[in-house]
Image (tube, rainbow, N blue to C red):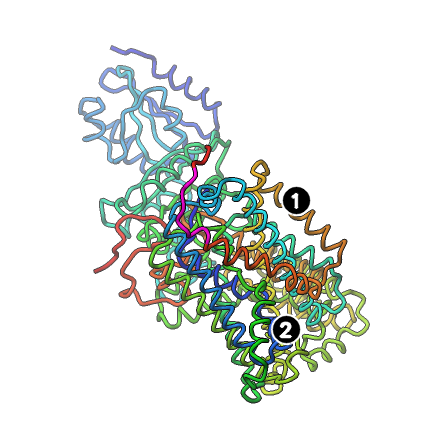
Amino acid sequence: MNQTLSARQTGVIASLLLLANKLLVLPSLLFESSKADGVFIVMFLLALELGLVALFVKLKQTCPNQSLYQIIQEKMGTFFAKLFYILLILYFFYKIMLIFNISYMYFHVQVYLDASYYIFIFIFLLIMNSCCLRGLRPLARGCEFMYIFLIGALVFCLFLSIANFNKFPLFFDSPIKNFFTGSFKYFFCFGDSLVLFVLMDRITLDKATKKSLFCHFAISSVIITVLYFMFYSAFGSTSFMYKNAVSDIITFSYRFIDLGRLDIISITTIMFISLLQLSLYCYALLQCFMKVFSRLSKTYSVVVFDIVFLSIVVSSMLNYLVAIELGKNVMVYFAILLQIFFPVLLLVPFGKRKVKK
Amino acid sequence: MPIFDVEQQISLISEQLNNSSDFSSRSFEKQTKKVGLVFLKSIIDQQLFVEGVYEPLIATKQKLDFASISTKILKVSGVEEIEPSQAIEKILQGNVVVLMSDSPKYIAVDIQKYPARTPSEPPTSAVIQGPREGFTEDIKTNITLIRRRFYTQHLVLKEMNVGKYSNTKVVMAYLKGIANDKVVKEIEKRLQQINIDGIIDSYYILKFLEKNPQSLFKQVGGVEKPDIIAAKMLEGRVAIMVDGSPIVLSVPFLFLEEVQASNDYYSSHIYSSFIRIVRILAILIAVIVPGTYVALRIFHQNVIPIKFLITITNTTKGLPFTPFLEMLFVDLLFQILYEVSLRLPSYLGLATSIVGALILGDTGVKAGLLSPPAVIIIAIAKIALYTVPEESYQLTILQHLFLFVGGSLGLFGIVGLMIYIVVYLASIDSYGAPYLAPFAPRVDSDLKDALIKETVNNMKTRPQSFSNKNKTRQK
């Protein structure tokens, strides 16, 4: 069952994860924090994300045949391995909640004005569960199959946004301090490449994989950066009012092309991307869950996940604003710990422990 | 010296065949020995029997033993010596069994002949240019059709009988040195493991060859033309012929094969590429459009362009059905018409089509039961469905699934179902070949014969999406 992913599939997964929750509300939030310099914040955070991918490559080169769990177990013992995986579970769970709430808000505003919240929960859970139960390889192949269409659709949206291009964004209009506070506050929106760490025993690192990983990373990074640039140029000082960047940048394009609401392209694309991202996150979460609670089978883990997910969603009625506040105040520390501290620590060469088998 | 009584043996064989009405026998004395011939007259070539077996045996002056009968006396080729225990099996396969009172063994002469139609162009694989012959129900004809495309000793034919009562002849055909031995062995093993009362058509075998027979998506190809199966065998696939069926199976099978047609290989590669893209679009239209239309009308009216929305609002005013039920109703009408036109004789089928398409559709709209957009949407989707007629059954099911999901969950449900189907297809494995190859996993060399088709001289390797030997096709 331990089938490895191809080089292209690894790159595609990294690329799709990178797009998670960065195309909708984040441009507006970054504008609130540091105006049009939000483009630089996102570039800076993408550079940090690239560093995380580089750390992954380095770790994979150091321990080519081991899983992340085995590496931590060898270096720090089973307790720390379990602790790290529990932190990962919490982090991935938060990410799922965040993507779910942002997507829900987006779809609700754009196309589902009258639809019930539970329709979304039902679809999200159904697709996440079924994709996870099919396994990583079918999921990765599915991502690979749809990737070109999704990226093509996003590029098309960016192309359409030219119609809304107003003037160059006014850069450096915010104090430098805002750049750092913005980068820190929204650091939790990044770190999606942590999923690769969890899947590292399913990835064979060769020259092709490295090339694919960095190429696909570059594609997503360019799309994100251009999107932020076009968004700030289109809406200028009112950018903070628009919460659905990828749709908003093409809102007025139909006036030039006369084909009705063209944002249906971006809406469907985001539907695909968010479902695939959530499935990937859910798969990574379940992998961590099964490591911590090794007696639970995959099916039972999915059931536990569903119960917890539903309990939290239904009882707290968590919305995207609460989720973002939670991210800014709490999850950002998790993110620093998991994205910087732990990977670096794993690369530090210190004595190997004997693991009881 | 006679060692048994021929007449007694004949009556014994007749009894074993339950004194079947088509059982027939002849007996005569020749050179101091009694000779008996037993056969089923319904499945032998009667003219060949008289001219090639019966008359030569009566007229001969040579010594009657197996060697001289098989080489000098009989004017037919398929002669073999058999044990008495094999007699019934051979008779049932269309052999004449010769019994001689002084020989402990029998002689079987194969002169089997069934009523068979001549190879003609199959209705689902018509071509504008290219070979027009198709497989028939007669397995011998089908073998001949394949054999004439491969004048090589590398063509391997393996025969076996499947089915407790039908004892149907099943033949595996592949090219040695190209087909993967592991796949050949796996197929052979699966065929040998079949324990069923009868095989009526290759579809019966197909379900035993599929790894997931419950799946909506077929994992074994079905081909009606010998040129297509020859091309597939050259790629390293294995063909399975079943007596009584004009459909020859092929494995491994990829999803891509659904959009490939024989005509693509006998016309310009540019046109073939264009038409393949059209086919893919047609499949998407057939499957998704009715569901999307319903989803837009129920959940997302704000997405529909305003001019079209006004048209829809005007035409659906006063309809007794909800958009979902209306679409289901139109679809049901079409399905009924389709079934009727399939089963009625052609002259009545035409009348039904006129009644269905013109009178029912037009009057339904005028009576205020249906709206023109719904009729048009179903008409477009159904026409699109038959761009790939072999897959129309599974596409029809998918169409209804999307319709149901679109009507109950909207656009997001449709997207979710699409993801589920893609991931499901990605999990299918046909004898080691990923079902969505060469797209997922991407196999660059095989993309030359995927959506965009290259010319034959540019396709230098065999498909890499599934295992085969000797990857080089041309240098």
Choose between B367 and A285: the one closer to the eye.
A285
SS category of the residue bearing label 2: helix
Residue A29's tag is 2
Q: In this view, does B11 lie above or below A292?
A: above
- Pointer 1 indicates a residue of which chain? A
Task: Report crowding for label 2: few under 14, some 14 to 19, many 20 or more residues within 10 A (C-alpha).
Answer: many
The percent position of residue A215, horizontal first and vertical second, equals: 41, 66
Q: What residue type is labelled 1?
A: Val
Residue drawn at point x = 67 percent, y = 48 percent: A306
Mark 1 → mark 2, Cα distance in angstroms: 33 Å
Residue A304's tag is 1
- Pointer 2 indicates a residue of which chain? A
User: Is residue A48 rendered magenta in the image?
Assistant: no
Say whether residue B117 is visible: no
Q: What stretch is highlighted in magenta?
A: A345-353
Choose between B210 and B268: the one closer to the eye.
B210
The mark total stands at 2
User: Is residue A348 rendered magenta in the image?
Assistant: yes
Q: Do discs 1 and 2 belong to a common subunit?
A: yes
Choose between B57 and B184: the one closer to the eye.
B184
Q: In this view, does B54 lie above or below A86?
A: above
Residue mark closest to the camera, 1 vs 2: 2
